[in-house]
Image (cartoon, rainbow, N blue to C red):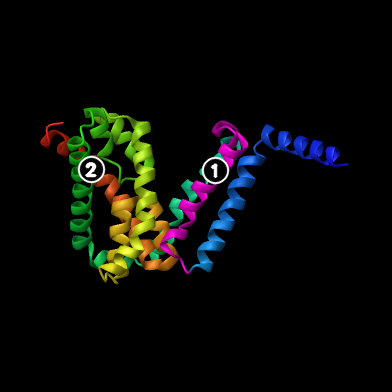
Amino acid sequence: MHGTEGGDLYHVWVYLQSGPQLGLVATLLVWQGATWLDRRTGHAAWSNPIMLSIATLAILLLATGTSYQTYFRGGQYVQFLLGPATVALAVPMYANFATMRRNLIPILIAVIAGSVTASVSAMLIAHGLGAPRDVVISMAPKSVTTPIAMGISQDLGGIPSLTAIFVLLTGVFGGLVCIPVFRLLRITDRRAQGLAGGTGAHGLATARLLLVSETAGAFGGLAIGLNGLITAILAPLLVRWLGF
């Protein structure tokens, strides 16, 4: 009896691995569990659903011996939704358009300052730790959303795949610490929170802030777009200025 049940489970597992069902179902179930836990904890810093989902999926793949390629056959459908999800940030941005227009100059100054600080500090730290030139350059666009960051890195002579990892780590860390840092520094203005999160840690921090405030999410979405444009323009100049 138990042997039959074990054989049935084995065949179900083989079937799931043969198609896109495994990655898709696993991603959705893990994400639902992570968001449920996040709500129960009152959006605590450690319960960031993005961080929890990444860690849980990684553990599941390692524990079951499932390759990333097998998982991604289904995970790619979730990844496809990143595009529409990013575009959907335009909805809260539209609701805050009047405020954004009135504060356009301060917004531009803040994003430019954040963009320069993020790129310069990352490159100087990497250089100070003895990283080779291509790694240093790969750090320059680490606070920009992934597609733009990889393009900038490639044009500058960096390693796009390494840049993608830096972007992911920056976003996860930013999403983890942004709200506690704002509380510690007593930054209560949702517009400032959104600009800081979107500029420093792109979409992952913005998604976290959107759970707290639509206004913060709106300004985070604006910062993502502006920071991508500004970094694409300034990064080559900064690399040349720093002598890399």
* Majority secondary structure of magenta residues: helix
Q: Is residue 113 magenta?
A: no
Quadrant in the picture for the N terminus: top right
Q: Is residue 101 above or below residue 118?
A: below
- Span of residues in magenta: 42-71
Query: Can residue 99 be spotted in the picture?
Result: no
Describe the element under mark 1 as helix, strand or loop.
Answer: helix
Tell me where residue 231 appears, x and y as whole percent. 24, 43
Tell me where residue 171 appears, x and y as whole percent. 37, 49
Q: Nearer the viewer, residue 185 or 112?
A: 185
- Left or right: residue 200 compared with residue 237: right
Residue 59: numbered disc: 1
Tell me where residue 206 appears, x and y as whole percent. 38, 57
Q: Is residue 2 above or below residue 201?
A: above
Amino acid on which the number 1 mark rests in the picture: Ile
Give the labeled residue for mark 2.
Answer: 122
- Left or right: residue 5 compared with residue 111: right
